[in-house]
Image (cartoon, rainbow, N blue to C red):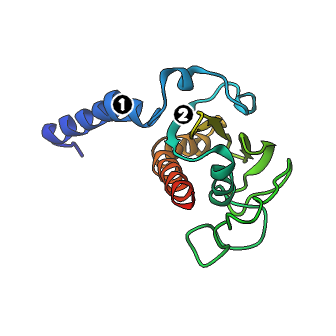
Amino acid sequence: MFLPRPLIRLAVGAAAGYLLAVRPWHLRWGATDSEVHEDLPGDDIVPLPQLQATRAVTVNAPPAAVWPWVVWLTGHPRPGARPGTAGPTPPDPAQPPRDLKAGDVMDGGGYVVERVEAPYSLVLADRGADATTSCSVVLRDTGGGTRLILRTRTRGEPTVRGAAHVAMMDVGDFVAMRRQLLTIKARAESAG
């Protein structure tokens, strides 16, 4: 069965548009050139990534006010539903943020805390059978606010499932990470 030429042209054009315009934009959404190219904590977990995305946003609140929202939204090591469901309640600004430590397992998804330096960095990793993924969250004090940087690095196993994992991360990661950054920004700014 052959596809009509106009349909083939449309598919090739859509793929080219994604690879040349959309993908470069979403792999670095909000991040500066220096943020994209600098080494961040956790980069060593996936030294040769097939996919690296660095996204960032400026939050009008100090790192100490942003940190509880990072811990809450990235999933916390306790029983309960994911944020946005009828599970754990948002952090109380009057209470200290929940302590995280290396080895804590996040709710859902299989991510494990690799490193934590509250309130400046959190490194998570998922070492699955099909791929290894690291997720680094870095908070930088801007002298009146916080630069919130989120980097994801993934390397799939040389299998069909590994390749599928990387391909799904390429598209799906942007939607989830952008939403997380904007939610953390909105919550931290409204709490202050």
Name the amino acid, label 2: Thr
Residues at badges 1 and 2 in contact (C-beta under 8 Å)?
A: no
Q: What x and y, as percent, mark residue 28? A: 47, 32
Q: Distance between the residues labelled 1 and 2?
A: 17 Å
- Earlier residue among tags 1 and 2: 1
Mark 1 neighbour density, 10 Å: few (under 14) some (14–19) many (20 or more): few
Identity of the amino acid at label 1? Leu
The residue positioned 54% from the left and 20% from the top of the image is 34
Q: In this orientation, which residue lies closer to the viewer: 160 or 32? A: 32
State the residue at coordinates (60%, 36%).
151
Q: In which quarter of the image is the C terminus?
A: bottom right
Above or below 5: residue 79 = below
Residue 107 seen by the camera: yes
In x, y percent, where is residue 187? 54, 59
User: Relative to residue 68, is residue 117 drawn left or right?
Assistant: right
Judging depth in this view, the residue of 82 and 33 nearest the camera is 33
**Residue 106, image x, y percentages:** 74, 58
* Residue 174 higher or lower than 75, as above or below: above
Using the rendered image of the protein, determine whether residue 155 is visible from the camera's viewpoint.
Answer: no
Across and down, in percent, residue 101 comes to 85, 50
**Quadrant of residue 48 within the rendered picture:** top right
Label ID, residue 150: none
Taking the image as shown, residue 186 lies to the left or right of residue 112, namely left
Q: Mark 1 points at which residue?
A: 19
Instruction: State which quadrant residue 7 falls in.
Output: top left
Pointer 2 residue: 54
Total tally of numbered discs in the picture: 2
User: Judging from the image, what secondary structure is the residue with disc 1 in?
Assistant: helix
Name the mark nearer the viewer: 1 or 2.
2
Label 2's element?
Answer: strand
Give the residue at x 57% y 45%.
Answer: 165
